[in-house]
Image (tube, rainbow, N blue to C red):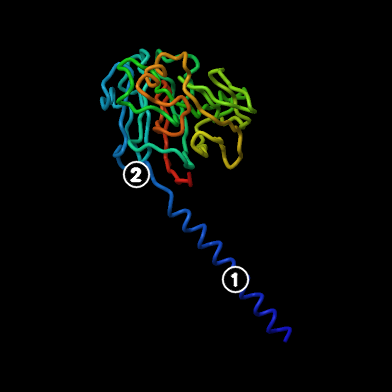
Amino acid sequence: MMSSRMSLAGILLLLAAITVHSCAGSQEEEWIQLFNGKDLSGWTVKITGYEVGENFGNTFRVEDGYLTVSYDQYENFAGRFGHIFYTEEFSHYRLRVEYRFIGEQVPGGPGWGVRNNGIMIHGQTPESMGLDQQFPVSVEVQLLGGDGTNPRPTANVCSPGTHIVMDGELVTQHCNDSDSETYHGDQWVTVEVEVHGNSVIRHIVEGDTVLTYSEPQLDEEDDNAKKLLQAGKPIMVSGGTISLQAESHPTQFRKIELLPLEG
């Protein structure tokens, strides 16, 4: 009788393990690969001073299977901030990005642009941006690399044309630091963004939650946000585009994937 009971317990444990593995596997199958590793299919470029779709200097390209931000065809940055937008919009999701900084900043780039890039979420469409608009109205998951010595957290939050709420208070300061470690050199870093519409948003670096906020909303004093409000956009932002930046420092992305979440 004892042997029979142990055998039954073993079978139940095995079935439980198989069930957990199966559920995890099915969840992995739901991830959408936003970047195919071959070309920029599904993405649209907008660079300051240029029409939508004009990829000046081949700034955004695919090299060795990586989505690469490059300035080898620039003589000077000249304020040409760029963004590459995924064509579909999202509201509730988990976004996973692997990135690294490479090379040197292009001449003429701003001092704060060294080893600086970003993931823009809840953004406006590239078609709705002005020709000379530098940044889409959005919430930025700011990506920063260390200088080899000083602390410099990544996955901070910045807010071009928007505000957020942290600890129950409206935050109007443009950029706010996370609690992440500093990542020096050209190492790959994994950042995830868990987005629940107009509710909670979390920044996660290498598996650790480093920043939490909520209620992203349009800044009624910002000129670009005013245009969206005049066009009928609600002040509370529940979804929008996802884009990657070109802020003057070469950057590579090797994974960009999204898991839709229940609304």
Q: Residues within 10 Å of mark 2 (few under 14, many from 20)?
A: some
Q: Which residue is mark 2?
A: 36
Q: Nearer the viewer, residue 194 or 76?
A: 194
Q: Nearer the viewer, mark 1 or mark 2?
A: 1
Q: Which residue is mark 1?
A: 14
Distance from the alpha carbon under mark 1 to that under mark 2: 36 Å
Q: Nearer the viewer, residue 228 or 67?
A: 228
Q: Residues within 10 Å of mark 1 (few under 14, many from 20)?
A: few
Q: Secondary structure at mark 1?
A: helix
Residue at 28%, 23% (x, y): give it: 57
Residue 40 x/y as whole percent: 30, 37
Q: Which mark is residue 115?
A: none
Q: Amino acid at mark 2?
A: Asn
Q: Amino acid at mark 1?
A: Leu
Query: Measured along the vertical axis of the image, is residue 135 above or below residue 215?
Result: above
Query: Measured along the vertical axis of the image, is residue 38 above or below residue 239?
Result: below
Q: Secondary structure at mark 2?
A: loop
Residue at 37%, 29% (x, y): give it: 69
Quarter in which the N terminus is drawn:
bottom right
Whichever of callouts 1 and 2 sits on the residue coming sooner in the sequence is 1
Q: Nearer the viewer, residue 135 or 55?
A: 135
Residue 141 x/y as whole percent: 50, 29
